[in-house]
Image (cartoon, rainbow, N blue to C red):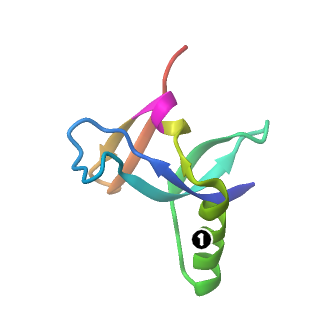
Amino acid sequence: MWKYGLIRIDYPGLWETDGHYCELVELYADVDGEYTSFSKARINSIKELQNAFNDVSRDGINEWFAENGEFKWDKKDKFWNWTKNKK
């Protein structure tokens, strides 16, 4: 199961205008139904854009990844890698 999400990126030294930087992503649910992974969002149609708008409007900004892990920029993929914090 997946949905679109707007996740807050917490990365030291990242340019910020208002204290927040977010990325539109596709969120993926684990076996327990919790959204614990993501990938680049792929928007290829107006319908997909509407779905992204609806999902983000319903859920707001997702803070879970910023609060529970560490982001690193992948220069090759030109997107974020994320590692969950160890407990």
Question: Can you give x and y, in whole percent of width and height, for residue 5 in the image?
Answer: 57, 56
Magenta span: chief secondary structure: helix
**Residue 1 horizontal side relative to residue 69, left or right:** right
Query: Which one is nearer the viewer's eye here, 27 or 50?
Result: 50
Report the amino acid beneath label 1.
Phe
Q: Would you place residue 58 above or below residue 61 in this image? A: below
Quadrant placement of the N terminus: bottom right
Q: Determine the image quadrant of residue 59.
A: bottom right
Question: Can you give x and y, in whole percent of width and height, for residue 57 in the image?
Answer: 62, 63
Residue 67 on the magenta segment: yes
According to the picture, the residue beneath numbered tag 1 turns out to be: 53
Mark 1 lies on a secondary structure that is: helix
**Residue 17 horizontal side relative to residue 44, left or right:** left
Q: Residue furthest bottom?
A: 46
Region in magenta: 66-70
Question: Can you give x and y, in whole percent of width and height, for residue 49 in the image?
Answer: 57, 77
Query: Which one is nearer the viewer's eye here, 29 or 18?
Result: 18
